[in-house]
Amino acid sequence: MHSPFNLSNIKATSFFMISCFFLWACENDVTQVQNWNQKVEMVETGKQILAYLSTEGKVRAKLTAPLLLRYQTDTLYSEFPNSLHVDFYDDSTKVESQLDALYGIYYESFNKVYLRDSVMVFNTNGDTLRTSELWWDQQTQKFYNDKPTRIDTKTQHLYGAHGIEASQDFSQIILNQPSGTIEVEE
């Protein structure tokens, strides 16, 4: 007589059940796999920011902003999405110029700041630079862009159709394709 519960049937049934379990356990949800493979951006948030920039032991600038988002990606950068204000100092820590913009990004590894939306820079003489976009190079302490730029002094209104390069105190200014009335002193 042949019994349905012999050892070979039990082994075969056990092997079949274990194989089904492993096949079922290895099944992956497509969205879970996609989520697993996505890069995760690390973001630090700061509110009511007050930060000082110093080089060679001297304070060079003071930044204030209502919101800071610092991203830790391949390139570290800090974003100021809700405006920023910067006071730039000379060697004796006197304010030599100030900057306002509605948006800015600081690229830490390049030591450069990109500004946009109602960018305005003014110095202690009352000279004012207005533009839609501007870069500030922390190493050279210069502003530059290739966008239309306007500079107002007490006596002049100057325009650069294709940008500007200027020291942060406006002691040196190069306008690309300038226009406006320039008064020359002898």
Image: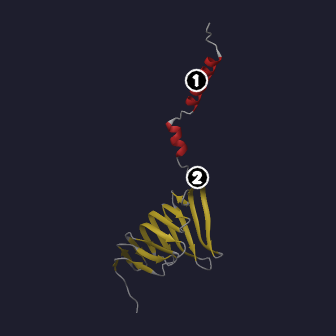
Q: Is residue 147 above or below residue 41?
A: below
Quadrant in the picture for residue 67:
bottom right
Of all residues shown, which one is farthest toward the front? Answer: 1
Of all residues shown, which one is farthest toward the top? Answer: 1
Q: Is residue 11 above or below residue 28?
A: above
Residue type of the residue flagged with mark 2: Met
Image marks 1 and 2: residues in contact by CB distance under 8 Å: no
Q: Quadrant of the N terminus?
A: top right
Q: Nearer the viewer, mark 1 or mark 2?
A: 1
Q: Position of residue 26 (x, y in %)?
A: 56, 33
Q: Position of residue 161 (x, y in %)?
A: 34, 72
Residue type of the residue flagged with mark 1: Phe
Q: How is the image coloured?
A: secondary structure
> Residue 171, labelled with which disc?
none
Q: Quadrant of the C terminus?
A: bottom left
Residue at position x 47%, y 69% in the image: 135
Q: Position of residue 100 (x, y in %)?
A: 50, 66
Element on which disc 1 rests: helix
In this orientation, which residue lies closer to the viewer: 148 or 126? 148
Q: Is residue 13 above or below residue 47?
A: above
Residue at position x 37%, y 70% in the image: 148
Q: Which residue is mark 1?
A: 16
CA gap, disc 1 and disc 2: 46 Å
Q: Position of residue 20 (x, y in %)?
A: 56, 26
> Residue 42, labelled with which disc?
2
Quadrant in the picture for residue 174:
bottom left
Element on which disc 2 rests: strand
Residue at position x 49%, y 73% in the image: 122
Question: Exactly how many numbered labels are in the figure?
Answer: 2
Q: What crowding class fits label 2: few (fewer than 14 Cα within 10 Å), some (14-19), or many (20 or more)?
A: few
Residue at position x 53%, y 59% in the image: 80
